[in-house]
Image: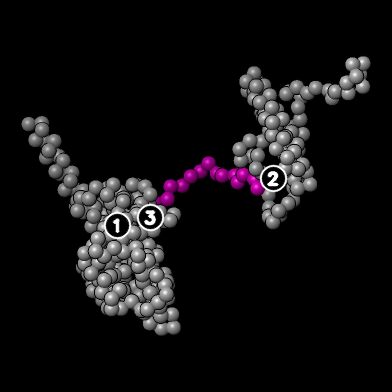
Amino acid sequence: MDRRGLPPQAPSTSPREADPGRVRDHNDGSRRPGGLTPDSIKASADPLAAISGLFTYAGLRDPARRNPVPRGREARWRSSGERSGMLAHTVRRPVSRSALRLREPRRLPVALSPEDAATLVGSLRSWRDRAIAGLMLWCGLRSMEVLGLHVKDVDIGGRWVTVTGKGAKQRRVPLDADVASVIDVYLLAERPESDSDVLFLVGKGPHRGGPLTAAGLRTVFRYHRGLTGVTGGHPHALRHTFGTVLAEAGVDLAVMQALLGHAHVDTTARYVHLAPAHVKAQFDAARERIRAQQR
C-alpha cells in the first residue's frame, strides 16, 4: 500500500518496450482448455483490442513497428506447445507458397460429330438409356444431374425439367419434345415398380428397382462405345456436343450459361472456340456491316 492507500502498481510499459511474446502468450493462453473460462475469454477481448489499438497508434509514428497482437488468420493459429482437441498432433501454420506460377493449358471440351452422336444414340435399345442420352445431348444435363433427377422434377406436359446441379443449385431447363416423349414411354412401359422416386432405375438383375448409379451409367456407355466404334462416346461428350450446337446456332452466351448451369460465363465461352466456322461467319457479317456504314 502506498501513502494514498492504493495497492502498488506494476511498472508501465510503453509500446516500444512491450514484449510481443508476452502478448501472444496472453492471447494463446486464453484459448487453452486449462486457461481462462469462456466468460473470462470474452472479457479479455477488450484489453487485447486496447493493446492492439495502442500498437496501431505507435505504428503511425514508427512504420517499422509491428503489432504483436495476432489478427485475422494468424489469430487462429495454434501456439507452439499447444496440444488440445482431436487434431492435437497437428499445428496450423501458413503454408509457404512459391512465387513461381505455371499457367496450365486450358483444355477445350471435346464434342462428337453429328454422325458419331447419331450412331451412338441409335445403338441404345432401352427407353431409359435413350432418355438419359437425350437429356444430355438435347438438354445439356451433366451425367450426375441426370442420375439425380426425381420423377417429380420432370414436367412432361409443360416440357420443363428442374435440375439440381453443382453446389445444389437448381435451374429449370426446357425439355426437348422428342426427349419428353421418350421419358413418357419409359415411365409408362419400362420403369420398374419401386418405392424410390428417382427417375432412372436399374431394370434388370439383383438391383432391379434401385437407382441407377454412375458406375452403371459408365458401363452402359462403355458397352455401346465398343459396339459402335465411337471411341469418344462418353456421357459428358454428349453435353459438350449440346454446347457446341448452341454456339454454332448463334445462341447468346448468357442463354447458354443458363442452360448449361455454368457459374461463370468464361466456362461457357469455351464452346465458341469449338465452332470456328460460326465465329468466322459472325466476323464476316460484322465486317460487311462496318463497310456498309463507311460508304
Is the stretch drawn in magenta largely helix, strand or loop?
loop
Which residue appears at 9% of the width and 35% of the height?
292
Residue at far top of view:
3
Can residue 111 be seen here? The reply is: no
Cα distance, mark 3 to mark 2? 40 Å
User: Residue 90 location in percent, x, y?
Assistant: 68, 53
> In this orientation, which residue lies closer to the viewer: 66 or 193?
193
Disc 1, SS? strand
The residue carrying mark 1 is 173
Q: Which callout, 2 or 1, points to the residue nearer the camera? A: 1
The residue carrying mark 2 is 78
The quarter of the picture where residue 160 lies is bottom left
Dot 2 alpha-carbon crowd within 10 angstroms: few under 14, some 14 to 19, many 20 or more: some
Give the side of residue 284 with respect to residue 202, left or right: left
Which residues make up the magenta segment?
A: 92-105
> In this orientation, which residue lies closer to the viewer: 38 or 138?
38
Which residue appears at 26% of the width and 65% of the height?
156
Give the side of residue 49 with respect to residue 36, left or right: left
Cα distance, mark 2 to mark 1? 48 Å
Which residue appears at 70% of the width and 37% of the height?
42
